[in-house]
Image (tube, coloured by chain):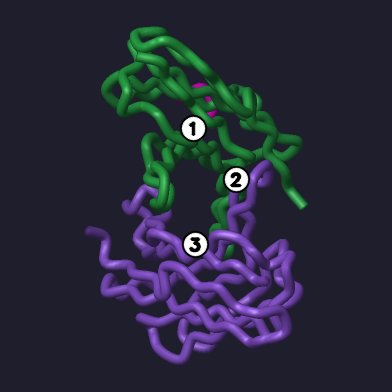
Amino acid sequence: GQQLNQSPQSMFIQEGEDVSMNCTSSSIFNTWLWYKQDPGEGPVLLIALYKAGELTSNGRLTAQFGITRKDSFLNISASIPSDVGIYFCAGLLIQGAQKLVFGQGTRLTINP
Amino acid sequence: DAGITQSPRHKVTETGTPVTLRCHQTENHRYMYWYRQDPGHGLRLIHYSYGVKDTDKGEVSDGYSVSRSKTEDFLLTLESATSSQTSVYFCAIRGADRRANYGYTFGSGTRLTVV
């Protein structure tokens, strides 16, 4: 099946630092999504990207849809304690039931 | 609140017993999905539904069955639970409206332990 390779798997940073994570795939996707999961909760959508090359921001978060449609990255600037959690990339094919394929996740830990 | 609830939130069961997890939505969304989450694997699709009585398999469907007899409820059944099915299970919903950003809305999860 389709797989997304997300890296890094974990990050340990100081508060205030910038964060970067990325996702690559062997398949082409029409849409890339980035989710965040807090402990004991389901993932929550952060950013959605619909076109190759698209760069989208949501507050301190910036994400880009790669030109090849096989990759995406997420940057978080000036990290704060509430950024702690697991971040997932997900690719979506716009066909049929539009199933999401998820990366393995990046666990972000912030030292105050 | 997105109007999706999962029950139970936690369950411990014995190997070989049947288990049913429930996902209930109040959004009248057409699409519903069951995922399992395991360390190192992200979320993997078990089964999904694209309407009442319309379901299909995902990538890890072995040992699971689903039913959707009405729009608001999507049930996941483990016919005979095994220790490999110990996991956190998430239900997700999505409307057919293209303006919905294609983003799924997830429930809070069910933590299942098979002993």
Establish whether labels 1 and 3 are both on one chain: no
Real-space Cα separation, disc 1 to disc 2, in angstroms: 19 Å
Task: Choose between A82 and B61: the one closer to the eye.
Answer: A82
Q: Above or below — where is A98 with respect to A61?
A: below
Chain given the colour purple: B
Q: Secondary structure at mark 2?
A: strand
Q: Is residue B99 left or right of residue B49?
A: left
User: Is residue A51 rendered magenta in the image?
Assistant: yes
Question: Residue B71's x, y, as percent?
Answer: 38, 83
Amino acid carrying mark 2 in the image: Phe
Q: Above or below — where is A83 with respect to B17?
A: above
Which residue is identified by label 2? Answer: A102
In the rendered image, which quarter is residue B24 located in?
Answer: bottom left
Q: Secondary structure at mark 3?
A: strand
Stretch of the chain drawn in magenta: A50-54
Chain given the colour green: A
Q: Chain of mark 2?
A: A
Q: Secondary structure at mark 1?
A: loop
Which residue is identified by label 3? Answer: B90
Q: Is residue B50 left or right of residue B40?
A: left
Q: Above or below — where is B18 with respect to B6?
A: below
Which residue is identified by label 1? Answer: A51
